[in-house]
Structures are given as C-alpha cells and as structure tokens.
Image (cartoon, rainbow, N blue to C red):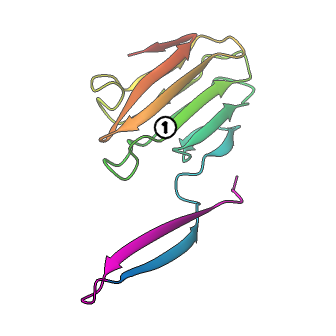
Amino acid sequence: MGCDCTQTVVSYTIDSAGIVQVSATTTPCTAGVASGAVASANGAITTLNGVVVITKGSAATLTLAAPTATTDDYKILKIESTTAYAHTVTTPANKINGSLSVITFDGTVGNFIELIAYQGIWYVEAQQGVELS
C-alpha cells in the first residue's frame, strides 16, 4: 500500500540584518505506511506494520521477529485467521508483553490479535480467540 501525500518541513532563520529567511523541503510520506500480507504457508511474518491474514488450510506455524527499538516504535500489526485451525505465531523469548513468546489461535475463523511495537517488545492492544504463553 502506498500513499499520495507529501510532507513539507518549513525552516525559519534570521540573518544578521534581522531578516527572516524561509525555506521548505517537500518529501513523499512513505515512512511507516501500513501494508498487508497473506500467510498461506508456514514461515516468517515479515510485515511489521499492517495486517497479516492467515489463509493456510491447516494449522500454520509462523514466526514473528521482535521489533527494533526506536526504529519500529508505534508500528501496529494485526494478525487475523480466515481458516478454522489452531495457528501459532512464535517470537523470540519475552517479546510479547515483555514475558511471553507464543500466540495460539483457538481454531475459529475471524480470531485475531493486534500488537503495537515499543522499545523492542510487541504489546497486545486487542485480541479475540487467542491464547498467549
């Protein structure tokens, strides 16, 4: 997903004669834009900002890297199941809420978890039909 927007940064300086100088720089606003992905097989979730939809026709075994402190702060990831299987998502040790590392879906279509990244940890914002361990 992209966006059709720009970001303009305006700078003001006062020269030695007391005259205000104005400059502006315009850039595309692509940083932090959410994306989507489909998990149709076992493997790594590489999307850290956006939505991942699990479509595998049997229990998916997925991995999710820890977010990078500062760089990934405030990124939001939603993982949703569209199939009725007990999918699992595993992170490195203690990277969910600071003490957990496994997300297990209960096998009901539509169940999800929404995570926000902060300082190298995924924090749960919302969940339905998943167990954390």
As displayed, is residue 11 above or below residue 52?
below
- Residue ID for mark 1: 63
Viewer-proximal residue among 5 and 64 = 5
Q: Quadrant of the C terminus?
A: top left
Span highlighted in magenta in the image: 1-18
Q: Is residue 80 above or below residue 129?
A: below
Q: Amino acid at mark 1?
A: Thr
**Is 8 situated left or right of 4 in this image?**
left
How many labels sit on residues? 1
Q: Is residue 12 magenta?
A: yes
The quadrant in which residue 55 appears is: top right
In the rendered image, the vertical position of residue 66 relative to residue 61, given as above or below: below
Residue 59, image x and y in percent?
A: 64, 23
Q: Nearer the viewer, residue 78 or 105?
A: 78
- Place of residue 10 in the rendered image (x, y in percent of width and height, measured from the top left): 46, 69
Q: Residue at x 70, y 17 (%)?
A: 110
Residue that appears at 68% across and 33% down: 53
* Residue 22 counted in the magenta span: no
Res. 60 visible in picture: no
Residue at the image position 27 percent from the left and 23 percent from the top? 99
